[in-house]
Amino acid sequence: MKLIDILKQEIDATYAATEGLIKLVDKDKLNWKPTSGKNWMTVGQLLKHLPTACGFCIRGFVTGDWAAPDGADGGDMLPTAEKMPTVKSVDEALKALKADRKLAIEMLDKAGEDQLQNKMASAPWGGPPMPLGIHAHQMVGHLANHKSQLFYYLKLMGKDINTMHLYGMGGV
């Protein structure tokens, strides 16, 4: 099996599970965030960030275009939670997630198998150059990490969810 096929399968599963969790967010909970600790995103901010965690970043690695997504401050690659934009609705988040999934797949196709395995790229936030496919895999992981964050937000809000929801299994 080719790397591009593995990445696409991972993308399909991660985006599907993320979509399922987003659909569980109550429209009146976009301003909710955990009460302990600091620098937490609100649910709305997390829903705005999810569709920039994977496809947007893969595009940056493939094309070199790191222009900030709509509503984000491109001058600060890692802003504090207070500076992060928010969605206005769950539907907005779902539409953006669908578009980002499409972008991720398009960028993998644009890169192709050879570049995914052999083109070296550097992240704008630092670190050593790595093959493009490794960066793409890490960006799927980035989305998966924030999907898990949303899962725990929903649990802390009292939603009756379990590991099947986290992984998008069983038609939940």
Image (cartoon, rainbow, N blue to C red):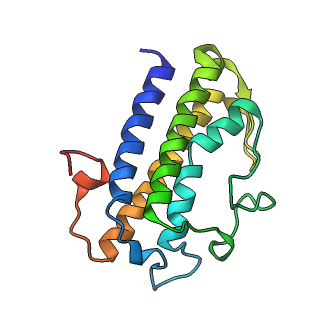
Q: Position of residue 146 (x, y in %)?
A: 48, 57
Residue that sits furthest to the bottom in the current view: 35
* Pick the front one: 96 or 120: 96
Q: Position of residue 40 (x, y in %)?
A: 54, 75
Residue depicted at 40% across the width and 43% down the height: 14
Image label count: 0
* Pick the front one: 111 or 133: 111
Q: Is residue 5 left or right of residue 169?
A: right
Residue depicted at 22% across the width and 60% down the height: 162
* Pick the front one: 116 or 70: 70
Residue that sits furthest to the left in the current view: 170
Q: Position of residue 152 (x, y in %)?
A: 36, 67
Q: Where 101 falls versus 86 (above or below)?
A: above
Q: Is residue 146 left or right of residue 157?
A: right
Report the quarter where the N terminus lies.
top left
Q: Is residue 123 left or right of residue 163?
A: right
Residue depicted at 39% across the width and 70% down the height: 153
Q: Where 94 falls versus 79 (above or below)?
A: above
Q: Quadrant of residue 129?
A: top right
Q: Position of residue 76 (x, y in %)?
A: 77, 62
Residue depicted at 36% across the width and 38% down the height: 13
Q: Is residue 75 left or right of residue 93?
A: right
Q: Where 63 falls versus 22 (above or below)?
A: above
